[in-house]
Image: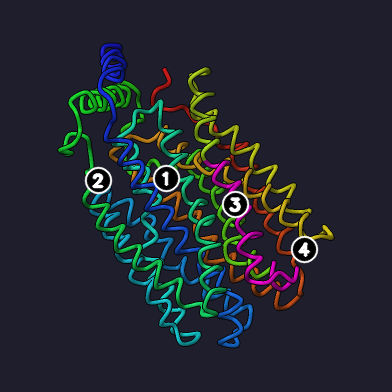
Amino acid sequence: MASSSKLASSTASTGTLRVRWAILAITSGVLILNYADRSALGVAGASIIHEFNLTKTEFGLISSIFFLGYAPFCLIGGLLSDKYGPRVVMGAAVGWWSVFTGLTAAGSGYVSFLIIRLLFGFGEGPQGAVTIKTMRNWFPQKQMGLAVGISQGSTPLGGLIGTPLVAGLIAYNGDWRLPFIVLGVLGILMTIGWFVIVRDTPEQHPWAGQAEVDEMKAETEALAQSTVSRPGTSQTFGYYIRQPHVLATAIAFFGYAWVLYTFLSWFPVYLVEARGVNIKEVAIAGALPWALGVLGYMLGGALTDWISARTGRPAAARRGVILFGLVGTAALLVGIGYVATLTAAVLLMSGVIFLLYLTGAQYFLMISDTVPAEKLGAVVGFVHLIANTSGILAPLIVGVIVDQTKSWVLTFGLSAAICIIGVVAVGIWGRARSLTEA
């Protein structure tokens, strides 16, 4: 094991530009598009509600049904990536969701939006598990926090880019349909780029140098030796999803996702209806939280890599950041409904998204640190599935609450309470030992 570490260290110091950074770049591009496409409906929501005379409950169901397709394909995508590799699974997913992004412009009423959004969710579901599988195949564990932080941190960047893009295109010609067509075309181009650039492993890539191939071989061998030498680390899928730290991570991830999907589906509508913001102003006010989300996600991954390098306890570092971030998120959420000004509401929500996304990489890393590669896609997919059941529930429940009570305070308070449930779960059951710990 020591010789493997020495080999990885020596190869890391040779060579120049490594293909892994191109893999990371195209993966980040895919995830930017993923969230730009997903956030587009929320930005266009006020226009769609007005044109088709939808109730808040109906629009909430349109937002929620996306997750009825998305959540199961989190797990299905992970299982398929373990079997067929991440390249073909992600490529097919991007092509699929891009077609249905474009078809959103053809929506003609409540039922058609339900069908389109359900099918759109099938394509978007695999991205989480497949991204972690791709990063694990290409990056050594000491860089996994950075790789996951940058790749998954690109999801709020998609919101940051997509919010002003969609709002700007709507403001430009007064038609909410144009941005969906533009995003759909961009997605087809991204699909082609993915298949050109990505291979499942360095060994399969014609551009990869021998140093990069050797480094990841050494990493794989070291982790394999650790798995063999420790009882209980080579088990079935069912074994891993019953582990307390896996279930605790899934519960906390559910709380994270509840807040995120409430924000994604309803914050633009809240700005327009509760704060009197027009669609042009949404492009600015709605983009600020996403900007801080990008910073939070990328900082969170790098921060826990830094802590792990100094403590030798990666899983404990990830757990600590989850606890800190979710407690802060809950505290700020409570205040949003009570502040008097638009500026204060946007600043508080920006703080919420920063702290929320500070934890974003940690849920994936808690699993990649503790589950062997051959089961990683499936276990990450399971945790992602549990988290994204919140997407089925949150947009719909928020719509019902606002319709029935007219209270945004209640919706933000509910989100805070669900965050705290995640804090309790990780605080009690979230302790785990990473594969690299002695």
Picture coordinates of residue 411 (x, y %)? 71, 64
Q: How far apart in space, not on screen, are marks 4 and 2 (Cα)? A: 45 Å
Q: How far apart in space, not on screen, are marks 1 and 4 (Cα)? A: 35 Å
Crowd band around label 3 with a 10 angstrom C-alpha radius: few (<14), some (14–19), many (20+): many
Picture coordinates of residue 44 (x, y %)? 55, 73
Q: Earlier in the sequence, mark 1 or mark 3?
A: 1
Nearer the viewer's eye, disc 2 or disc 1? 2
What kind of residue is marked 2? Val
Q: Is residue 11 magenta?
A: no
Nearer the viewer's eye, disc 4 or disc 2? 2
Name the image quarter holding the C terminus. Answer: top left
What kind of residue is marked 1? Ile
**Residue at the (65%, 68%) spot, across then down:** 398
Please state which of residues 188 and 334 is positioned toward the viewer in this rendering. Answer: 188
From which residue to which does the magenta span run? 271-297
What predominant SS class does the magenta segment belong to? helix
Nearer the viewer's eye, disc 1 or disc 4? 4
Q: Earlier in the sequence, mark 4 or mark 2?
A: 2
User: Residue tagged by mark 4?
Assistant: 409
Crowd band around label 1 with a 10 angstrom C-alpha radius: few (<14), some (14–19), many (20+): some
Q: Is residue 332 visible?
A: yes
User: Residue tagged by mark 3?
Assistant: 255
Q: Which mark is residue 63?
A: none
What kind of residue is marked 3? Gly
Say which element carries label 4. Answer: helix
User: Residue tagged by mark 1?
Assistant: 241
Q: Is residue 244 visible?
A: no
Nearer the viewer's eye, disc 3 or disc 4? 4
User: Residue tagged by mark 2?
Assistant: 198
